[in-house]
Amino acid sequence: MNRELEKNPRLAWMYGQDIVPYVFVRQENRIQQPGTAFALDWFQGLNHLWLNPLNMSSRSFGDQIMKMETMAFGPSGMPMPRWVFYDCAVMPGFVAGFAHRTETLPEAVKKILTVDSANEWTPISLFIIIPSMGEGEWVAHNLSSVNALIPKEHQFYGLGFLTKAFGMWHANIESCCGMTQWQSPAVRLHSHYGPFEILTSYTPLHSYARTLTYRLKTNTEYWREFFGLARVEQDFTQYFKPAGFEVDTKQDASLQDLQNRIERGEGPFYLSATEVRKKPLDAALTIYLPR
């Protein structure tokens, strides 16, 4: 199969023999017709690794997922408790990502993860996705990869972005909510899956009040733009217009002002993925309204 991304030599890792997508999901939660909602060939024909988190034989693989997640989020004070992983992630939803054949893992990864050589496969990324009560809507709970833990020269290009894309593609997710912190590089990544609506700009119920809650409608042209295969800026300006103000993500007062506007029903408000990607992480961002 001649897939679009195979033309990019930096993405050769995804189409070799040593890395496969995995889905860590209990039998009852398996997607019946995975990857049928979007005209996208990126993951077509790839062998998938399926593991049931309810089986004791999957414990070691789950331990590796948790270890990677803790290393990624522990320094920020937001590691996921083990019971949350089970009760709130794998029971209602599933975990997806990429796994590397353990015996051929780069030494840089082995050193960081302290892998179990008894496992044929070792997870190198994770995306937790949970269905919500909103019809057709899912919640992205967690996303991370070994790229955040290893030197740049050993990283897998696009791994984090493709991990979320694979999970959304696999589950045919057309509407996705999520949470991230302002000024985090994650804002750039998450805004590149579709038109990016701000649900909260200031969230005191969260452990970190400067948390951004978002909702996006999946648009795979945004995905293609991430790899320079499309341009969505013109399409964005066709459907959205500046609201006449910016948000200064460094200032609580600015975040609270935007939150008050949201609660008064002045929105819905959106961010431009192109602007988010091009501006410094601490720059003020233009707020947009639908035309």
Image (spheres, rainbow, N blue to C red):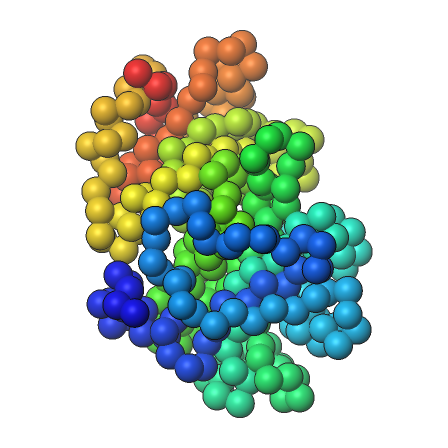
- Residue depicted at 77% across the width and 70% down the height: 55
Q: Looking at the image, is 191 positioned above or below residue 73?
A: above
Q: Which of 91 and 114 lies nearest the eye of the viewer?
A: 91
Q: Residue 186: percent from the left, percent from the top?
A: 46, 48
Apparent side of residue 139 relative to residue 66 in the rendered image (left or right): left
Q: Residue 266: percent from the left, percent from the top?
A: 46, 11
Q: Looking at the image, is 272 positioned above or below residue 6?
A: above
- Residue depicted at 72% across the width and 65% down the height: 53
Asked whether the viewer can see residue 70, the reply is no
* The quarter of the displayed image where residue 245 is located: top left
Apparent side of residue 18 relative to residue 78 in the rendered image (left or right): left
Asked whether the viewer can see residue 290, the reply is yes
- Residue depicted at 50% across the width and 25% down the height: 255
Looking at the figure, which quarter contains the C terminus? top left
Q: Which of 64 and 223 lies nearest the eye of the viewer?
A: 223
Q: Which of 173 and 62 lies nearest the eye of the viewer?
A: 173
Residue farthest front in this picture: 33
Please tell me how many numbered marks the rendered image carries: 0
Looking at the figure, which quarter contains the N terminus? bottom left
Apparent side of residue 151 relative to residue 57 in the rendered image (left or right): left
- Residue depicted at 60% across the width and 31% down the height: 135
Q: Looking at the image, is 144 positioned above or below residue 192?
A: below
Q: Looking at the image, is 104 positioned above or below residue 32?
A: below
Q: Residue 181: percent from the left, percent from the top?
A: 53, 41
Q: Which of 29 and 77 lies nearest the eye of the viewer?
A: 29
Q: Residue 66: percent from the left, percent from the top?
A: 67, 65
